[in-house]
Structures are given as C-alpha cells and as structure tokens.
Image (cartoon, coloured by chain):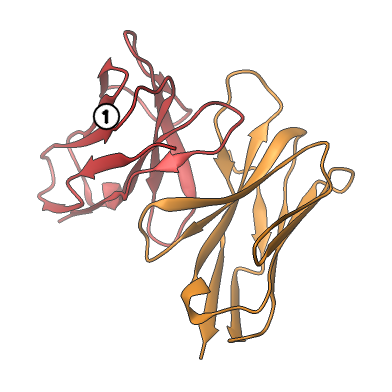
Chain colours: A red, B orange
Amino acid sequence: SAVISQKPSRDICQRGTSLTIQCQVDSQVTMMFWYRQQPGQSLTLIATANQGSEATYESGFVIDKFPISRPNLTFSTLTVSNMSPEDSSIYLCSVGDRGEKLFFGSGTQLSVL
Amino acid sequence: SQQGEEDPQALSIQEGENATMNCSYKTSINNLQWYRQNSGRGLVHLILIRSNEREKHSGRLRVTLDTSKKSSSLLITASRAADTASYFCATDANQAGTALIFGKGTTLSVSS
C-alpha cells in the first residue's frame, strides 16, 4: 500500500493566476498519475508523471497549461496555469502499478473566481 | 475517452437493503476495478477482478464480470448509512501503456 499526502486540500484562486499542487508518497513508486474531476463528473486522466523525463499527457491536455514535475520516485507537482473558472475541479494524484489498484491522495478542490 | 458507463446514475435505498450497480465498457480489458469516493475526496479501492475471473467477493461486496457482454456489477449487501458514496468502475484496457479509465459513477444514498 501507499500513503499519499496531497496539498493544498483546497484553494480559491483568481483567474489568470497559477496554482501548484504537491503530491508526496511515503514510498518509492514507478507510476504517478494526475486526474481531474470536474463538478459532478467522473475522473479524467491528465497525464502520467515520469521520473526523469517529461510527463505523458492525454488528449486535450497540454504541458503549457498543466506543467508537471517528477524530480524523484516519491514526489510530483502539477501546476494549473493561467486559470479560468473552467479549471474549477478536484485534482487528484494517484500511484500504482499498471494493471493493479491505484492509491489516491485526498484531492485538491480548486475554485477559480 | 470514457470507457466505463455505470447505471443507475443515482440509487437511493434503505439501510439493510442490497444495492446493485452496473458497469459497461467498450474495449477488451485486463481487469476491472471498483472504487468508492466519499464527498468528492480521494478514491478508495474496493475490489479488482481480472478478465479471467467471473465473480469475486470481499466482505459485503460481490463483483461479477461478463467479458462477453463487456459488463460488470457491484452488489453491496445489507447496506449501511456509511455506504453512502459515489461508486466508480475503472478499466485497465488491454493495451500497453494505458492507465485506468473511469466510468461516470453511481451515487448511492443509504438512509437509516
């Protein structure tokens, strides 16, 4: 199992600003994923955070808008850049091996005014 | 892209009753998983069933998988108020390099 600390747990931001979300895992993990959950919706995969290389983004998500860092096997950050109200969502960090269960952080609830 | 589709979207039952949620998916899979989410927070893994399995149990949970129909069901027996949450199915598509794809979820409300 893995224990994930994600922060901040929530934030209210002004449009045009950026927010960086941190994800810390209590053990080394190969795979880290960032998901977005828009209000009342399911989870959508933003990207896979790769240690030592650029993140792999899903269709509809770009590095300029959602830059991701993965400096080591226990830590990753997701930045939501130049925010607009449409970015208001819950952002979730998760870890796990492909084909096995995922462990999730408690999420970051972002509201953009 | 959305892989799983749950139904019903919402379900309201009384404590002690059973709750059944269904999930359909589109492509072949390695496994299918069910997760619970309380109040829009982080998801908790409930159960994983592999493509060569047909049924799996964990406590009050029973999951079935029918790969010919590309569908799964989650049964919660003797429900409790604490089971009130959103439930999502997620599939690990049978393609190299893909992550879990989540369905739209079923919101379960259990009243005492």
Could you tell me which residue is drawn at 42 percent across and 19 percent down?
A30
Q: On the image, numbered disc 1 is attached to which residue?
A: A65
Tell me the element at label 1.
Answer: loop
Please name the amino acid that badge 1 sits on: Lys
Relative to A28, does residue B12 appear above or below in the rendering?
below
Q: Mark 1: few, some, or many residues within 10 Å (few <14, many ≥20)?
A: some
Could you tell me which residue is drawn at 35 percent across and 57 percent down?
B41
Percent across and percent down for residue A64 are 26, 23
Percent across and percent down for residue B20 are 71, 70
Could you tell me which residue is drawn at 38 percent across and 44 percent down?
A36
Q: Is residue B26 left or right of residue A40?
A: right
Relative to A61, does residue B5 appear above or below in the rendering?
below
**Can you name the residue that lies furthest to the top here?**
A52
The part of the image, by quadrant, that contains residue A72 is top left
- Which one is nearer the viewer's eye here, B15 or B7? B15
- Which one is nearer the viewer's eye here, B57 or B81? B57
**Can you name the residue that lies furthest to the right here?**
B68
The part of the image, by quadrant, that contains residue A57 is top left
**Can you name the residue that lies furthest to the bottom here?**
B112
